[in-house]
Amino acid sequence: MSTFERLTEVLEMSEEIPFNDSSKIVLFSDCHRGDNSWADDFAHNQNLFYFALEHYYARGFTCIEIGDSDELHENKRFEDIRKAHSHVFFLMRDFYEEGRLYLIFGNHDIERKDPKVVERTLYRYYDEQTQRYEPLFDGIEVHEGIVLRHWDTANRIFLAHGHQGDLLGETLWWVARFISRHFWRHLQLLGIRDPTSPAKNYKKRRIVEGEYIRWVRSKNLIFICGHTHRPMFPKPGTPPYFNTGSCVHPRSITGIEIESGEITMIKWWIKPKLEEGGTLYVAREIVAGPEKLSSFFPRRD
């Protein structure tokens, strides 16, 4: 199937989650959490991500990860990833236990479309100190798509990773996993980019983004995805295709906040305080917005 057809299919089968103008939601994608080796693209930003999560947890936000949360193409064992970033997962567990965490799978964690894989790897973990299994995300469902439906207006925000319809990313994902695990992982250490990925192949990325925009034009909704790693925040009156960016940028992580009926693109980065002799601190910076969600929804006469 084409990207257009697959996105439509996922939209029609997605669970709906109600929200309103008092809801607080933060969207991240493409963390690509790894095993903290040199091939782990998330490792250099793990403290930024953890600090951001602490910020959102304390302020009552719901966190939704829109795919490629963990790098399961390059890493055979999720347990290695969990151990490497245990502080992140324990904080995510706090979100989950309060009903404030949702996960969507992408192409690099596509095996989580199988509920048995989710149960085996995410429900619990083995605690080496207590020598027993402890709950992690017990009973969690990993979605392919989620629809946020506004309580008052019934307008929709569709969330999906964006790999739908990609030959290697979806249909032949097991081939892509083999290549990543046994080939690109090693070349990555030499600085060679994977040309099959839209995140690293600019020509392919433009084609994929064109498909998203064409699809959005045919639907009366907002579409927010990841996959390309390129943050996107449209102007009101243009096709409402948003992209969260990623958490593996060289010096920052990007995401999207929905709060008080507004949508904002933000980044978290290490910033110097010049007045204090260059002291470094973690800063939240607005990249685009805020804009009223209503300015992107279809007009209702």
Image (tube, grey):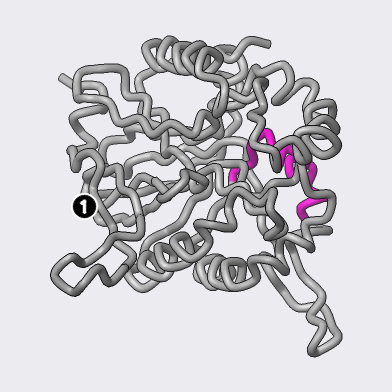
Q: In which quarter of the image is residue 22?
A: bottom left
In screen coordinates, is 14 left or right of 225?
right
Identity of the residue drawn at 26% across and 63% down: 272
Q: Which of 158 and 263 is in front in this view?
A: 263
Residue 300 location, x and y as percent? 20, 22
- The residue positioned 63% from the left and 25% from the top of the image is 197
Q: Nearer the viewer, residue 108 or 171?
A: 108
Residue at image x 50%, y 57%? 45
Q: Is residue 116 visible?
A: no
- Camera-nearest residue between 197 and 212: 197
Say few, some or many: other residues with alpha carbon within 10 Å of mark 1 (under 14 / 14 to 19 / 20 or more).
Answer: some
Say above or below: 198 vs 120. above
Is residue 215 at least partly visible in the picture? yes
Check if residue 115 falls in the magenta segment.
yes
Residue type (three-letter) at the residue carrying disc 1: Ser
Judged left or right of residue 179, residue 299 is left
Q: Relative to residue 193, is residue 299 drawn left or right? A: left
Considering every residue shown, the one lying at the far bottom of the view is 130
Q: Which residue is drawn at 84% across and 49% down?
A: 76
Report the front residue among 119 and 290. 290
Expressed as whole percent of the image width and height from the top left, the position of residue 164 reads 62, 23
Magenta stretch encompasses residue 28: no
Q: Relative to 99, is 104 above or below?
A: above
Name the element at disc 1: loop
**Image quadrant for the C terminus?**
top left
Which segment did they paint magenta? Answer: 104-118
Q: Choose top left, top right, bottom left or bottom right for residue 173.
A: top right
Q: Say which quarter of the image contains residue 60.
A: bottom left
295 lies above or below 50? above
Q: Mark 1 points at which residue?
A: 260
